Every structure is written in C-alpha cells, then in structure tokens.
C-alpha cells in the first residue's frame, strides 16, 4: 500500500488539559512524522500562537479557566489572513450547538473524541498537507494477538484501543501506563469529596475520567462517567448519592486490573530490550536529546529514550536512569531533570 506523504512541513499544536488525550493525539500525529507542540490550557495555547505560526490547532472543548471556544476566538483575533491556523475542535459531544459555538468562534470544524485516524486523515488531505494512502505499520491482527494479556482487564476493548493508536501496541501501552496514574488521581480526588456538596468539582473529575476511558476504549466506564458528569452538572444530588458507591467500585477494580496488566507488560518489555552496549559518545548524544525532551514535556519520546539507554548503558548509569524513569512515570519532570543534570559530571 502506498504510504501517505507529507507535502510540506507543518506545525501542529495540541491543546488539552488531560495528558492521556495529548498522548493519543501525539501518537496519531507521529504516524505522519509530525512532532506536535502541546499546551495544557487555553491561556498557554494563546501564548504559543503569539510566537509560532501553526498550520493546525487541535482544540479540546472543555478546559478549566478558558474553554476551547473562547481560546479559538482569541487565536483568531491575534492571527489574521493567511496566517490563521486551521482550528479543529475536539469534543466528546458533537452536536449542532457545540459545532456552532466552535465555528462561530472561527474553527474549521469539530470532530468527535476520541479522534480517529481516518477522520484526521481526511482533514490533512482536505487541507492539502498529505497525499497518497495510509501505510500499514504494524499489522492489526498481529498487534491484537500480541495484546491478548489485556483481555484480563474487564471492560477494556483493547483491539479498538490499538486501532485508535494506528495499530501500535507500544503506543497504546504508553497511553495505558499514563491512564493508570490519571485514573487513580481522579479516583482519589472523588473519594475526598464524594460525601460533600461539591457537585461542580465532581463533574470535572467525571468529565476527565470519561475522556480517559474513551481514549483507551473502556466504553462501558466512559458511558457511566458521562451519566455521572451530566447528573452532577444538573445538580441531581440524590442520583449521585445512589450511584457513587457502585461507580467508584467499578473504577477501582478496573484500575487494579489495568495496573497489573501494565506492570506485566513493562517488565517483559524492558527484559526483551537488546543489551548492546552504548558508546560513550552515543550516550552523551542521547543524554542531550533526553534533556531537550524533558524540557518540552514529551512523555513518549522521554520514555523511549530512557528504555533505550537503560538497555545499553554502562552499569554506573543504570541507577540514575531508573530514578529518572520512575520520576517520569509520575510526571515529575523537574525531578527527572535534576537527576539528569548530575549525570554530566559522572
């Protein structure tokens, strides 16, 4: 099959306050050799557009402080004429009202979350950025067969999840690893406020969990999270009280099973990495790449580099590399950078 060809270099900005959503979109862009910039808020997105001419902005709808619609409006105001990027709204709910809000603000269109590769590809072709047909990558059946261990996670449609990652089990597992931590974070915050009147705060956590479950193809939990989100938005306190126990138990059990699967995969994956020793010059080169990636919060590239360095580096570096790996898994980028800086003198 003929591969897609990028007609010219394009700059893409991914705007989303959820790390899982960012990783899913970044993995999709990697299929086309596009390395995206990211922004975790509307405010940050506007500042980036002030200094960089982007061709495409993938814009989340619901974000704290400033939502995607207002962010789109401000981006349109500060850019003009041929310098205006194509803004693609990304929302779990795509109806006439949401679409009109985005298009009135200047967006080109709205695409349903989780964004599927075929939908995004249509837009890239429409804008004239690519030509040809999608390349095959990892054969879908082979990827699904090798992911059979994920069948132990009840409620996870892993074949659909891998398809969302353009057939890459490796990228899917990276998203699942981040999801394990994000699910636990929102679960713990909900646990703190489940017996309070903070329905608005609950709604935000339900919304974030819905997005995570959608992106990894845990469809039943995504639907349940949406029901809880809407009920909290409508201040249906009695419904929340009646359902929160069952919902939290389902999330807890799913998280437990997913963590076991991810830990198993991570151990096997590190064990099978080739152990060819890395030359000192190559190690320093990778160390510099690692520093740049940490500065830019590029989770996937950081973990790829660290796994490569762990497999081939001198034993004296293994301890610190593992410390960095553990820090990155908890999104402690500053801590990882501090560890890295100590290695230049070793």
Image: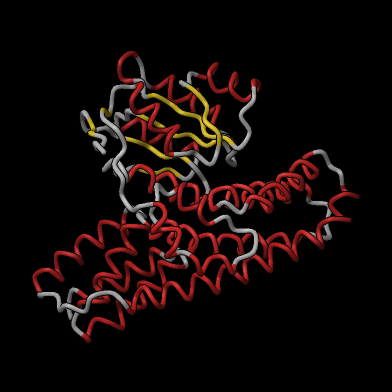
**Residue 319 on image: x %, y %:** 31, 83
Give the farthest residue toward the top.
81
Q: Is residue 317 above or below residue 97?
A: below
**Residue 160 on image: x %, y %:** 52, 50
Give the farthest residue toward the bottom.
315
**Residue nearest the observer in this picture, 79 or 272:** 272
**Residue nearest the observer in this picture, 65 or 144:** 144
Question: In the image, what residue occupies the spot 55% across and 23% down?
Answer: 102
Question: In the image, what residue occupies the spot 47% across and 39% down?
Answer: 116
**Residue 240 on image: x %, y %:** 84, 52
Question: In the image, what residue occupies the spot 23% across and 33% down?
Answer: 6
**Residue 336 on image: x %, y %:** 35, 69
Quadrant in the rendering for residue 277? bottom left
Left or right: 118 in relation to 187: left
Screen quadrant of the C terminus = bottom left
Left or right: 199 in relation to 48: right
Q: Is residue 104 above or below residue 311?
A: above
Q: How many marks?
A: 0
Screen quadrant of the N terminus = top left
Quadrant in the rendering for residue 327? bottom left
């Amino acid at each position: 099959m003929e591969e897609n060809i990028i007609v010219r270099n394009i700059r893409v900005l991914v705007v989303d306050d959820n790390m899982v959503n960012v990783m899913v979109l970044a993995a999709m862009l990697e299929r086309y050799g596009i390395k995206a910039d990211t922004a975790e808020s509307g405010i940050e997105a506007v500042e980036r557009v002030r200094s960089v001419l982007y061709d495409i902005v993938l814009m989340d709808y619901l974000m704290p402080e400033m939502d995607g619609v207002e962010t789109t409006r401000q981006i349109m105001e500060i850019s003009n004429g041929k310098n205006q990027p194509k803004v693609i709204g990304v929302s779990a709910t795509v109806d006439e009202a949401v679409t009109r809000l985005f298009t009135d603000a200047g967006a080109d269109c709205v695409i349903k979350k989780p964004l599927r590769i075929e939908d995004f590809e249509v837009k890239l072709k429409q804008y004239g950025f690519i030509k040809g047909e999608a390349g095959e990558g990892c054969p879908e059946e082979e990827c699904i067969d090798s992911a059979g261990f994920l069948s132990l996670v009840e409620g996870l449609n892993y074949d659909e999840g891998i398809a969302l990652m353009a057939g890459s089990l490796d990228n899917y597992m990276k998203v699942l690893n981040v999801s394990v931590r994000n699910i636990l974070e929102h679960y713990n915050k909900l646990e703190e406020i489940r017996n309070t009147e903070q329905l608005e705060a609950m709604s935000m956590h339900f919304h974030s969990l819905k997005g995570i479950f959608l992106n990894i193809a845990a469809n039943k939990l995504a639907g349940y999270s949406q029901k809880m989100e809407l009920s909290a938005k409508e201040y249906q306190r009695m419904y929340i009280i009646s359902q929160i126990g069952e919902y939290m138990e389902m999330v807890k059990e799913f998280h437990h099973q997913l963590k076991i699967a991810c830990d198993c995969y991570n151990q096997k994956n590190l064990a099978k990495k080739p152990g060819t020793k890395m030359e000192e010059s190559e190690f320093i080169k990778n160390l510099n790449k690692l520093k740049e990636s940490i500065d830019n919060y590029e989770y996937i590239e950081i973990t790829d580099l660290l796994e490569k360095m762990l497999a081939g580096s001198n034993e004296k570096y293994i301890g610190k590399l593992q410390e960095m790996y553990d820090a990155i898994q908890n999104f402690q980028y500053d801590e990882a950078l501090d560890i890295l800086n100590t290695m230049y003198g070793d």
